[in-house]
Image (cartoon, rainbow, N blue to C red):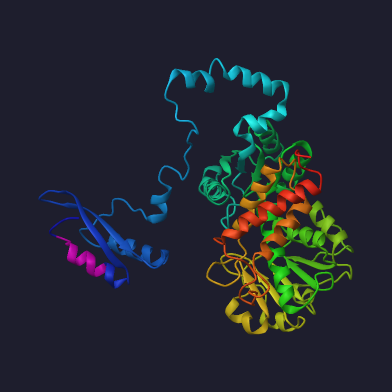
């Protein structure tokens, strides 16, 4: 900042003009010609932050050298660390953790590979794997750009379920190469958590790995959303006094999440599901190049409803959107059945604004934290992996997923249920324990636990 052209009073006034708060000022370096200051500003949202930054850049005598914010500061150096369980202090300890005594453990595992679950970190360590092709709502990014997301997932695994999770970004989009790479690294992990991998390759990757690995493989973008949706619907149906087997459900967005939600609902007993994508309803009267859509056509829409979203929702009891924002109209909701259950899960903009829909529906959920009933995958994946690892499961099957959904729903007592409270909060301490216990038991009952 050139002293003769700008002073701190001018800077403070400018910041205030944009409804930001000046929190702190530290002088980093000063000489007769310029002063370098570290200025901390509190803003209400990112748009205010950008307005202040742009205004400072345009102010004569001011040069913005570096910009950071709380989110970026949290990410400095990454969000994870690795710590040993033993405080190594002497040669005697060294001889046991490394050479020569460690050779005995190596030989034992070589003779009985299943001992790796007990004698290494394998049984409490998972790999979170992404290729960067579907990062949050950002779409395809370079693989390094997926790291902040899967580091965050690793933090959540540890915080909520004490599961060690290591983030792995792959610099390839070839499904076969991804499959081979995951298979090659699998001996060191007790499970694989697939994350931010686009459709349709995510289906091939997961299905192949499930067949060829003897550890659980779980794609959170598919199954996490599906499990929490089912949990919320089970409670919403209690409020509307309807049965899952009898209601008409419209799923809007037949991608990874939409297909997984449909499979989950079918596994839980739903009978009447209609899928809609940009081209209209998915029906068995048409042929699809997409194998997933062809499967969908043969397992849903028994009445062969053909047409647009507006046509599909007529008379429907439930709408589940995992598509794009602002595609559902108030007139569409009015054509639905009484006591509509509406899950508008597109982010950041739901398929219809809750403010527009609220008076026309009985129960509504979104993917956003600023509205009631947030569908958040954090409610399921820590407990699911904790239960699967504890059971030494070979897979995470439908029985385990449905058990997880029922456990999440059951954390809200029926006396507590309301239109604005069908899904528990992510910091509800009961959720992980109850999901873990339900998944653990389902693994044993369904025959995929090594403990049998």
Point out the image quarter for the N terminus: bottom left
Residue at far top of view: 100
Q: In the rendered view, would you say 3 is above or below 116?
A: below
Where is residue 119? Give x, y as percent.
Answer: 63, 29
User: Residue 26's image quarter?
Assistant: bottom left
Relative to residue 7, is residue 451 drawn left or right?
right
- The image quadrant where one finds the C terminus is top right
Q: Image quadrant of residue 128? A: top right
Residue 250 occupies quadrant: bottom right
Examine the rendered structure and indicate whether residue 109 appears above or below residue 8. Answer: above
Q: Is residue 380 above or below residue 237?
A: above
Q: Is residue 103 above or below residue 444?
A: above
Left or right for 420, reference 216: left
Q: Foreground: 199 or 63?
A: 199
Q: Looking at the image, which residue is at 22% across and 61% down?
A: 60
Quick one: 41 or 47, which is closer to the camera?
41
The magenta-colored residue range is 5-14
Residue 40 location in percent, x, y? 29, 59
């Amino acid at each position: 900042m050139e002293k003769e052209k700008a002073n701190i009073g001018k800077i403070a006034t400018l910041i205030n003009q944009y409804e930001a708060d000046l929190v702190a000022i530290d002088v980093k370096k000063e000489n007769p010609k310029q002063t370098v200051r570290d200025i901390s500003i509190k803003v209400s949202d990112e748009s205010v932050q950008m307005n202040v930054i742009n205004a400072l850049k345009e102010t004569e005598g001011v040069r913005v050298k570096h910009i950071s914010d709380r989110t970026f500061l949290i990410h400095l150096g990454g969000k994870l660390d690795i710590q040993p369980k033993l405080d190594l202090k002497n040669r005697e300890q060294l001889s046991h953790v490394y050479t020569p005594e460690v050779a005995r453990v190596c030989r034992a595992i070589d003779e009985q590979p299943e001992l790796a679950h007990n004698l290494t970190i394998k049984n409490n360590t998972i790999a979170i794997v992404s290729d960067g092709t579907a990062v949050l709502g950002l779409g395809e990014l370079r693989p390094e750009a997926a790291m902040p997301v899967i580091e965050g997932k690793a933090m959540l695994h540890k915080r909520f379920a004490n599961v060690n999770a290591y983030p792995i970004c792959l610099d390839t989009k070839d499904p076969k190469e991804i499959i081979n790479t995951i298979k090659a690294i699998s001996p060191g992990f007790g499970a694989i958590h697939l994350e931010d991998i686009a459709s349709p390759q995510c289906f091939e990757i997961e299905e192949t790995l499930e067949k060829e690995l003897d550890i659980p493989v779980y794609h959170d973008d598919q199954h996490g959303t599906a499990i929490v949706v089912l949990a919320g619907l089970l409670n919403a149906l209690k409020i509307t006094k309807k049965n899952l087997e009898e209601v008409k459900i419209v799923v809007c967005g037949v991608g990874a999440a939409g297909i997984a939600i449909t499979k989950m609902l079918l596994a839980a007993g739903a009978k009447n599901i209609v899928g809609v994508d940009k081209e209209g309803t998915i029906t068995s009267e048409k042929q699809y190049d997409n194998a997933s859509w062809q499967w969908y056509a043969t397992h849903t829409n028994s009445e062969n409803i053909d047409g647009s979203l507006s046509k599909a929702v007529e008379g429907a009891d439930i709408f589940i959107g995992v598509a794009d924002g602002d595609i559902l109209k108030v007139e569409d909701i009015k054509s639905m059945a009484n006591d509509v259950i509406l899950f508008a899960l597109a982010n950041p903009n739901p398929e219809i604004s809750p403010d527009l829909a609220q008076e026309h529906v009985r129960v509504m959920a979104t993917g956003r934290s600023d509205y009631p009933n947030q569908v958040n995958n954090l409610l399921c994946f820590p407990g699911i992996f904790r239960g699967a690892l504890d059971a030494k499961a070979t897979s995470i099957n439908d029985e385990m997923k449905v058990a997880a959904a029922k456990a999440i729903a059951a954390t809200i007592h029926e006396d507590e249920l309301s239109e604005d409270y069908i899904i528990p909060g992510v910091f509800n301490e009961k959720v992980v324990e109850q999901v873990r216990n339900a998944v653990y038991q389902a693994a044993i009952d369904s025959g995929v636990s090594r403990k049998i």
